[in-house]
Amino acid sequence: MTLRTRSTAIIGSLCLVAGFAVATASAEESAPPRAGAAEVALTEVATAQNPTAGTAGPDGTVWIAERAGTVRVLDDSGLGDPVLDISDETTTDGERGLLGIAFDPDDSHFYVSYTDLEGTSTIDEFAVQDGKPDPDSRRTVLTQEQPYENHNGGDIKFGPDGYLYIGLGDGGAGGDPHGNGQKLDTLLGKILRIDPAGGDPYAIPSDNPFVDDPEAKDEIWAYGLRNPWRFSFDSGTGDLLIGDVGQNEWEEIDWAAASSKGGENYGWSAMEGTHPFDGGTEPANHVPPVHEYDRNGLGCSVTGGYVYRGEAIADLVGTYVYSDYCDGTLRTLQIENGEVTGEGDLGVEGGEVVSFAESADGELYVLAIGGTVSRLDPA
């Protein structure tokens, strides 16, 4: 996740090392009624230590990752004590830390995505015993060396197909100095797709798009990404939505239909959104973003969210909800067949929003790096 002010291209490392400012979301912050818009409130439900990611857990819980390396369970009584602590194995230099968590489809295994003490992106697996990760079952599934402290990506999700998807940034610095976004011989700047249950340490799905290309990494599902900090699957349709953090001018949301066979090239670093970057030429197979926005306003770093599929806010069902780290407003898109048919915002501000979490019943939680964990409720 690269974080910037409007006057500076990259200040992510400075902001993260400094611990960020305190989030500004308040309990029960309500949107004013607006014609044609869902009326919502943000209800503060817990305070965490620099929350970075969340996922639905067993028995209706939501599990929250804290950047230093702890995982805590959110239930009706709030956040409990850590059920996992790998803080002595993580580094929080730059944009590093515990960056992603996920359960497999039957909640029998728990996965963490983090940067180790050398800064290497690492995916580890734990068997779940008695509702907690079993430390004795721990194994490393995948690693990827990172040349710089930023653009680690780190989000992980199981797709509707039961495979594990992994987001990795282009390796960092600025402007993709190694050209990783367009290279197919590296995992950097990609969405990966693997089967952790199918092999040791994992298997490659036979229908991955580049398995027959000897010059490409078999794990690659999609490429041309700068820093896919947060991505998600629509639990109603299976469509994939990626919030890819921009360089100097444009933030973007990328989209792929559930029927996609993979192989999409989202353009970086030849393109930033729909615009050639630094004299680049648009690739012939470029898949442009479904939505982009510039940073002439308060936005500086997109935070991808989810298509709302809960029951609490009927007017919001089917709407993609996302935000921006610097702006904090919960923004919305209506997307039909890969085309945006409407955009707006919910009139509430979640602080320095770094992530969203979706509960098993489709309700959404908003995570601000200052510590606030809020639930999106009807006003």
Image (tube, rainbow, N blue to C red):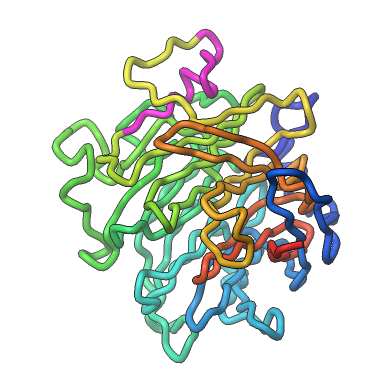
Residue 353, percent from left and from top: 71, 51
Does residue 291 sit above or below 282 in this rendering? below
Which residue: 84% across, 66% down? 27
The answer to which quarter of the image holds residue 216 is top left
Asked whether 271 falls inside the magenta stretch, the response is yes
Which sits in the foreground, 292 or 89? 292
What percent of the width, then of the height, locates residue 360?
A: 50, 71
Q: Nearer the viewer, residue 150 or 80?
A: 80
> Which stretch appears magenta?
264-279
In magenta stretch: residue 336: no
Specify the quadrant of the image occupied by residue 87.
bottom right
Residue pushed farthest front?
35
Q: Is residue 265 left or right of residue 168?
A: left
Viewer-proximal residue among 314 and 360: 314
- Frontmost residue, 318 versus 45: 318
Question: Image point 36% across, 57% down: which residue?
Answer: 159
Q: Main secondary structure of the magenta part?
A: loop
Q: Residue at x 62, y 76 (%)?
A: 72
For the N terminus, give its image quadrant.
top right
Residue 287 point in image, percent of width and height: 39, 26
Q: Is residue 374 left or right of residue 184?
A: right
Residue 253 in view: yes
Q: In which quadrant is the C terminus drawn?
A: bottom right
